[in-house]
Amino acid sequence: MPIDAAQALAAEPRSGEIGWTAKDVQLYHLGIGAGANPDKDSPATDPDELRYTLETRLHVLPSFATVAGGGKPGVTGGLSMPGVDVDLARVLHGGQSLTLHRPLPVAGTATATGRIAAVYDKGKAAVLVMRTEVADADGPLWTNDAQIFVRGEGGWGGDRGPSARLDPPTGDPDRTVDRPVRADQALLYRLSGDYNPLHADPEFAKLAGFDKPILHGLCTYGITLKAVVDTLFGGDVTRVRGYSTRFAGVVFPGETLRVRMWREEGRVRVTVGAVERGDAPVLADTIVQHS
């Protein structure tokens, strides 16, 4: 069996130093659509967008944690851990969760420690939970969990793990906003560290079964969190305590994302669909925990 769950779970964590600057934060924010003016008739940038783009006002959207330091150790690092030997063509990024221990600094250096936190047997697939814990001199900053599906690697009789599916939100959403995705959004977002040609090269995308390159799932993840923060939190990024989602479908650059939000005690439930494809699901089981 290419995945040896016991060996993978027992493997020593891998640690490395990461760093980021204000420029990295600004580039990430631009990569998820910051600075765009929803009022097409106005030539001026929305002043509220300057908190994402102007160094003198800069704050950090928590989803930046997924790319800080180039996203290391990341999914590729986890797939090279002892006990894991898989075909990358069978790998799907199924979900992402982020826990914030305190607000992210605009610039910093930290130690990122990555390990495989869980291995689940889903029958036709295995699921690896790749955990990255990041801390600086002042203590823990964030914990990232990436849920990675490896098709064809289940069926060994292991723990199925918890279900990621939630009951859908009930009633009408409290807020609904549309967020256009620029035609060149993936080309800009990839400069934050994810250079997978699936998101840029049409020929590679066709080999993967798509008519054209698709947007990074973590770009949609960032666009969605920004929509929630701007719409419900008055732009206050420090209110975010945690953020989790399941990647339910692809987005093509140039499409429009429809973000629906339901307020609950201490959290916001969110769904995201692609408007031009009949509201096809993009993100599901999405929760933003907040203070």
Image (cartoon, rainbow, N blue to C red):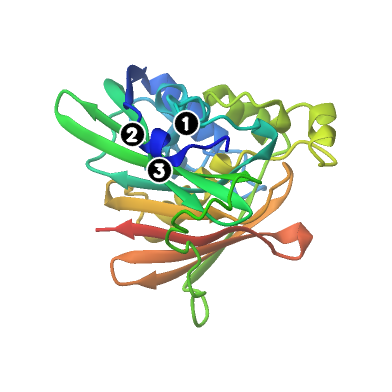
Q: Is residue 197 above or below residue 217?
A: above
Dot 1 or dot 2, earlier in sequence: 2
Q: Position of residue 212 (x, y in %)?
A: 82, 38
Distance (Cα) linking label 1 and label 2: 9 Å
Q: Is residue 74 left or right of residue 136?
A: right
Closer to us: 23 or 38? 23
Distance (Cα) linking label 1 and label 3: 19 Å
Q: Position of residue 86 (x, y in %)?
A: 60, 32
Looking at the rendered structure, which numbered label has been put on residue 10? 2
Furthest residue to the left? 138
Residue density around tag 3, few if under 14, some if 14–19, many if 20 or more, within 10 Å: many
Residue 144 visible from this viewpoint: yes
Residue density around tag 2, few if under 14, some if 14–19, many if 20 or more, within 10 Å: few
Q: Residue at x 53, y 27 (%)?
A: 76
Instruction: Indicate the amino acid at tag 3.
Output: Asp
**1 and 2 marks in contact (CB < 8 Å):** yes
Q: Quadrant of the C terminus?
A: bottom left
Q: Position of residue 1 (x, y in %)?
A: 57, 38
Dot 2 or dot 3, earlier in sequence: 2
- Residue named by callout 1: 83
Q: Is residue 63 left or right of residue 247?
A: left
Looking at the rendered structure, which numbered label has been put on residue 145? 3
Instruction: Indicate the amino acid at tag 2.
Output: Ala
Distance (Cα) linking label 2 and label 3: 18 Å
**1 and 3 marks in contact (CB < 8 Å):** no
Residue density around tag 1, few if under 14, some if 14–19, many if 20 or more, within 10 Å: some
Closer to us: 149 or 273? 149
Circle 2: element type:
helix
Front: mark 2 or 3: 2
